[in-house]
Amino acid sequence: MGETMGELGLAFLKLMKFENQEASYNSQKARAADIKNVATATVKASRLYRELNAQTVKHLDRSSALLTVQTLLTELSSLHSRAEKLDTASSKIFGGDRNRKGEELKEAIKVTEDAKSCAIREYERIKVQNCNIQLRNSLVKALLPGLDRLKDTRAGRNLANKILDLASPRRR
């Protein structure tokens, strides 16, 4: 959606440029101004859609990782309860069947715990990455006022230097 809106906005900008070049009446100039407003709004909407898509992907990654962790925890709990039931019923089951089922459950528990550990690490990585992005954004927001002040100070100095250059007599 964002790509389409961006292309539409650029097409409107090209149309506006053509209208401005060919405009001979006030109505054509007014239409060109209206087209420029529509083009600007369309390009801004395109940028918003792109940002929305990026945010959605970020939140879906985290939600998906959390769902994976929760699913594995539930499966692990189920396997542990099955193992406990097998242990309590072990007095009724004799022979290799009980041992085979016990070994299969232990192996399934081990594999599920490994998968759970990997899923938790992935979820934590995504959380840290999201926190780093938020921290970086807050730092940039905190630095922007200082940057504005610095630009204002430099602009004032440059203006003062130009005034001094103009005011001082030139030597030839």
Image (cartoon, rainbow, N blue to C red):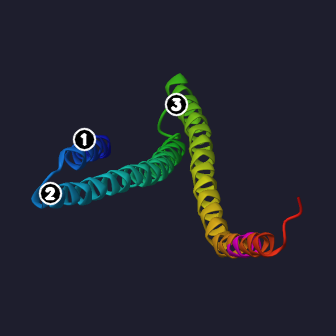
Which amino acid, by three-letter code, is at mark 3?
A: Arg
Q: Secondary structure at mark 2?
A: helix
Label 3 crowd (10 A; few <14 / some 14-19 / many >=20)? some
Which quarter of the picture shows residue 116?
top right
Q: Position of residue 89 (x, y in %)?
A: 48, 43
Q: On the image, numbered disc 3 is attached to which residue? A: 98
Question: Which of marks 3 and 1 precedes in the sequence?
Answer: 1
Q: Main secondary structure of the magenta part?
A: helix
Q: CA distance from mark 1 to mark 3?
A: 73 Å
Disc ID at residue 11: 1
**Residue 57: image x %, image y %?**
42, 48
Circle nearer the N terminus (3, 2): 2
Please identify, in this view, whether the residue under mark 3 or under mark 2 is nearer the observer. Answer: 2
The residue to which callout 2 is attached is 31
Q: Is residue 64 left or right of residue 12?
A: right
- Per the image, label 1 sits on a secondary structure element best described as helix
Depth check, front residue: 167 or 82: 167
Q: Magenta stretch?
A: 152-158
* Number of other residues with Cα within 10 Å of mark 1, as a class: few under 14, some 14 to 19, many 20 or more: few
Q: Residue reaching furthest right?
A: 171
Residue 127 shown left or right of residue 3 in the figure: right
The reply to whether the magenta stretch includes residue 154 is: yes
Residue 51 found in image quarter: bottom left
